[in-house]
Image: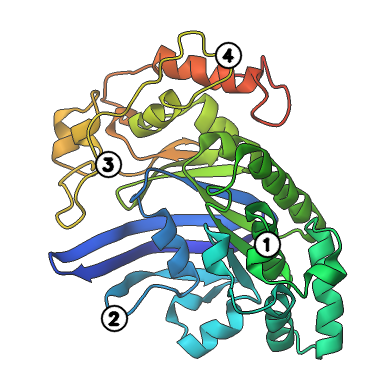
Amino acid sequence: MEKILDVKDLRVSFDTTGGEVEAVRGVDFHVNKGETLAIVGESGSGKSVTTKALMGLIPKPAGQLKSGEILFEDKDIAKYTERQMSKVRGKDISMIFQDPMTSLNPTMKVGNQIMEGLIKHQKMNRTKAKSRAIELLEMVGIPNAKRRITQYPHQFSGGMRQRVVIAIALACNPKLLIADEPTTALDVTIQAQILELMKDLQKKTETSIIFITHDLGVVANVADRVAVMYAGKIVEIGTVDDVFYNPQHPYTWGLLGSMPTLDDEEDQLTAIPGTPPDLLNPPVGDAFAARNKYAMKIDTQEEPPMFKVSDTHYAATWLLHENAPKMEIPEAVRKRTQGVASTGAFGENREGDTK
């Protein structure tokens, strides 16, 4: 498949009163045209910082893009000036932020907020921009669009505000859409509607999506591929089936083991012990070693490379080294992945298709 985005050795740090925090520490991934890549991990793992770097939104001077390439359609936008990025941002790459109320200007009518990008990037006059804004609101499922474009954000519910934010993000037909936990602030019913809306819109527009979340149930529903982040690095990446049915990194095992399912008879989740490392002083070796009950001596001495599991699946754990003891996926984790399939969290019944 053709790549629309290729990120190589991305490193981002922040200057704080305590010293330099290495928030993103050498991240590599790509996004193909028309696919959805989900990036998952605990809070503080570097997910949002990574995507803000793609948008050129790292706050300066405290934040710095230390190194790396961000190849968007084979052009390294990491080297772009703010003026150059302003032409890309909103037009070719758009972002849906976590909280719609802070994403929208409370003093502007929603119609004007949608029209802004159309006038700037699409060079539309106000009449055409208004007509297109109404179309966009209808497309994202807001009734009475002609009337509602004249209203302010506080006159919309949380779910409707998020639909407005999606309409703004899609206004200029972006080639890449970044969704940073867009359903976190919404209740479960509205969350399902927003996810269904995004999948439907992607089919119509063929937009590539990077979906940031900590909710593995969401990942199962929306993603083609999954990248698992921990302590500023990607520790496992593969297709949804690779990561859910054949996870290789102990951190991925922990995430899957802590995921509730509808048919969980024991109703007992497996927690990951400890806390993420302090990135003021990143640990030597594997950053997950202190929380990993399967850790070996080498985990505290050397950082593991990305080992190839298959053509689509890679994981950074010494357990994949040819001389490492052979470890089976914990039974509790395997049961949970099968439970997710049987309860239909993948959007279809895949029971029996558990490799």
Which amino acid type is marked by label 2?
Pro
Label for residue 166? 1
Spatial CA distance of label 2 from label 1 is 30 Å
Q: Nearer the viewer, mark 3 or mark 4?
A: 4
Q: Are marks 2 and 1 in contact (CB under 8 Å)?
A: no
| Picture quarter with the C terminus | top right
Q: Is residue 338 left or right of residue 304?
A: right
Q: Are marks 4 and 1 in contact (CB under 8 Å)?
A: no
Label for residue 194? none
- Residue 327: image location, x then y, percent: 34, 18
Spatial CA distance of label 3 from label 1 is 39 Å
Residue under circle 2?
61
- Residue 175: image location, x then y, percent: 68, 67
Label for residue 304? 3
Quadrant in which residue 352 is drawn: top right
Residue under circle 4?
263
- The local crowd at label 2, few if under 14, some if 14 to 19, many if 20 or more residues have their Cα within 10 Å, is few
Which mark is first along the chain, 1 or 3? Answer: 1
